[in-house]
Image (cartoon, rainbow, N blue to C red):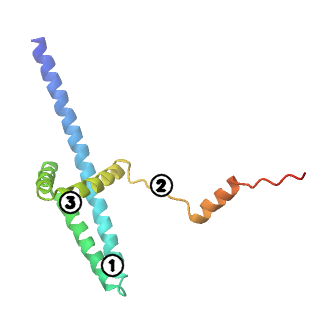
């Protein structure tokens, strides 16, 4: 009887952990979809300023539409459905899937880190630091 209670307790604990993980994954999924929608909006805004370069404008609009569609798909789909679709895509287009996996891995890593991007110092700032750190030795008089 004690084993039954322990087994039920362990099963309950596993179910609770799964539920928490699922809720966290759903939250991250929605945050990712929101980031994609924001990126799509930025691309649409950019395309509006590219009137003098119609080819680039067309590519930018196409990319914005694709990002918007991907954002809506992620938002409305559950994790299992997204996984099943990814498996099907991998079977049909392995090279594309490899590329998407790499890009997706980078995106997921950034999402888990909270989308923090460390600013790079400008070239001028780097040269100032470089000049300060590398003082030339004065030649010795003999």
> Element under label 3?
helix
In the image, which disc is placed on residue 47?
A: 1
- Crowd class of label 1 (few under 14; some 14 to 19; many from 20; radius 10 Å): many
Quadrant of the rendered structure where residue 124 is? Answer: bottom right
Q: Residue at x 73, y 54 (%)?
A: 135
> Element under label 1?
helix
Q: Residue at x 28, y 77 (%)?
A: 59
Give the CA separation, mark 3 to mark 1: 26 Å
Toward the front, the furthest residue is: 142
Q: Total marks drawn?
A: 3
Residue placed most toward the observer, 93 or 112: 93
43 relative position to 71: left or right: right
Toward the right, the furthest residue is: 142
Q: Is residue 31 visible?
A: no
- The reply to whether dot 3 and dot 1 touch (C-beta < 8 Å) is no
Residue placed most toward the observer, 93 or 1: 93
Give coordinates of residue 121: x percent, y percent: 55, 60
> Element under label 2?
loop
Give coordinates of residue 95: x percent, y percent: 20, 58
In the image, which disc is placed on residue 111?
A: none
Toward the bottom, the furthest residue is: 52
Asked if residue 77 is positioned above or below residue 69 in the image, the reply reads: above
Give the CA separation, mark 2 to mark 1: 27 Å
Quadrant of the rendered structure where residue 31 is? Answer: bottom left
Residue bearing the label numbered 3: 96
In the image, which disc is placed on residue 118?
A: 2
- Sequence-wise, which precedes: disc 3 or disc 1? 1
Give coordinates of residue 113: x percent, y percent: 38, 48
Q: Is residue 20 visible?
A: yes
Asked if residue 106 is positioned above or below residue 12 in the image, the reply reads: below
């Amino acid at each position: 009887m004690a084993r039954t209670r322990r087994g039920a307790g362990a099963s309950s604990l596993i179910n609770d952990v799964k539920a928490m993980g699922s809720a966290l994954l759903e939250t991250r999924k929605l945050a990712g979809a929101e980031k994609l929608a924001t990126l799509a909006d930025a691309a649409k805004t950019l395309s509006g300023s590219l009137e003098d370069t119609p080819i680039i404008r067309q590519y930018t609009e196409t990319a914005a539409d694709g990002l918007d569609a991907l954002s809506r798909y992620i938002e409305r789909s559950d994790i299992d459905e997204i996984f099943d679709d990814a498996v099907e895509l991998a079977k049909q287009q392995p090279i594309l899937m490899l590329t998407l996996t790499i890009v997706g891995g980078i995106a997921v890593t950034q999402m888990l880190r909270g989308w923090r991007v460390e600013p790079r110092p400008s070239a001028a700032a780097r040269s100032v630091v470089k000049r300060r750190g590398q003082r030339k030795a004065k030649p010795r008089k003999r």
